[in-house]
Image (tube, helix red, strand yellow):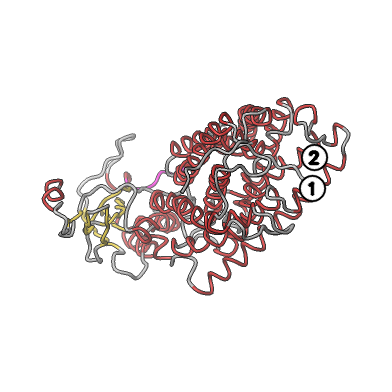
Amino acid sequence: MKLVIGIVRPEKANDVLEALYRAEVRGVSISRVQGHGGELDRVETYRGTTVKMGLAEKVRFEIAVSDEFVEPTIDALCDGARTGDVGDGKIMVVPLERVVRIRTGETDHSAVTPVAR
Amino acid sequence: MTAPVLAAEVNTGDTAWMLVATAMVILMTPALGLFYAGLVRSKNTLNTFMMCAAALAVATVMWALVGYSIAFDEGNAIVGGLGHVGLRDVTFVPRDGTTIPHLLFMAFQASFCILTVALVSGAVVERMRFGPFLVFAALWSVLVYAVLAHWAFGGGWLQEQGTLDFAGGIPVEMGSGFSALAAALVVGVRSDYGRQAFLPHNAIYVLLGAGLLWFGWFGFNGGSGFSTGNPSVLAFTNTLLAPACTLVVWFALDLLRGRHVTAIGAATAIIVGCVGITPAGGFISPGWAMALGGLAALPSYAIIVLRPRTRVDETLDVLAAHGIAGITGILFIGFFAQQSWNGVADGLAYGDAAQLGEQALAVLATPVYAFVVTFLILRLIGLVMPLRATVREESLGMDIVQHGEEAYATGEGAILIGPEASTDGDVALAGERV
């Protein structure tokens, strides 16, 4: 089991969700984050005050998957989020020690497997 | 120079009301900015409001320079003359047929021009670049608004042949609505149109904007009699009654369609009702105004439901809310104008079928003129500069790209590189503030 973390452009979040859905990855959490990834700083001016905005808005996906879903998830994140310009984001994969589904108490592999409707 | 004296014909009561009414209509443009800004995505909030600010700037200047003259100087049936260019001969002496200073009459009419330019921006927000919009606002305010205002109010052919338009169904409502359609077609759809849902980012802005617009509309319609006389009182009261009926009918339509009465729908209904009563305000009885308010909801609601299914990204539905409701109001006069209330003319229901024909002529000519001329203006500007932002800029948001500001800046990660050292001794103060 892995936790796949993808940090993507906010305007690409819908495309990523769509790609994940097509890859049959169902369990997703997202949050709005701010970060810096080497892209050019924006300069903004508010009356007399000029500032360099060092942080850009990003959306962070957290997806816990069983091993066979790791590659499809990464592919979906890349497909959905890539524009080719600096600032497209990162994907990080980290091992998961334990997963528990709260409703049923199922653990690990069965906890990250989507429920059949 | 001798001190200016009040011309003999000026009526102080009328003047006092028209001063207030003008200020109320000026408030409608920032109110529209709020209404529009709430309907777009948060990354385009400032740009959307700034389109309205652009109208306050550019349309006012153009109106004073040439627009007023084209609209209200005697000319031919199509355009006015150049006698009032640069506000020449616009003084304290009232214009013929009015009892308020000519200068005030000009200012009141200016507020209409400004609002109408701002209305058109609703068709192209979230993608049109700010620079070309400034050029568009300048040309459109003269070539479309001023000409249509001349037709309807300034002694042009529609007014001469007897078409009734109390407060601007022709130049303001139909003019903006059908120009918006043309503008949406020339500028094109937003890059994710039809693929992604674009949700209003702040419904409270929308409701507050609609409320302020309604308030301003009492000056808009109530001031269009240019006096404190009966037509103004009738139009003022009808501006209360008609939108209330539109709201009721809109609630019912919302319930039938989706089981919920929606807030954005209510805000839209207020606008549609105000638009519907705009041309008819001073010409129909309060009872018929209520009927008009209810009726106006139907065609506008239908267009709002159907338009997003097309490839026409007329983003904030200016055509449905203004163009279509304007037509409803203009035609309604042809049926239910009542001489016992307006002292001017009867409609079909009260024995004068010809009035309906005169109204219908305006409904045929105005949309065609507004659409064609707007289409040409934007095509011409497009030859000189790109009308719209790139896909990349569009996804970043027009606020940052066009204005270098954000509506909801948090300040996190902002590194101070200014204020630049200024020479006027305010440096210490500026430093202190940081």
Q: From the viewer's side, name the closer residue of B100 and B377.
A: B100
Q: From the viewer's side, name the closer residue of A71 and B305.
A: B305
Q: Looking at the image, do the residues carrying marks 2 and 1 touch, with CB atoms under 8 Å apart?
A: yes
Q: Percent x, y for residue B98?
A: 65, 39
Residue B128 horizontal side relative to residue B306, left or right:
left
Residue B275 visible in image:
yes
Q: Percent x, y for residue B413?
A: 20, 53
Q: Which residues are magenta?
A: A112-117
Can you name the residue that lies furthest to the bottom here?
B383
Compared with A93, B28 (above or below) is: above
Q: Determine which quarter of the picture holds residue B322.
A: top right
Compared with B244, B320 (above or below) is: below
Task: Name the residue carrying label 2.
Answer: B334
Identify the chain of the residue marked 1, using the numbered disc in the image. B
Label 2, label 1: how far apart the Cα atoms are: 8 Å
Which amino acid lies under the numbered mark 1 shown in the image of this protein? Ala
Compared with B310, B266 (above or below) is: above
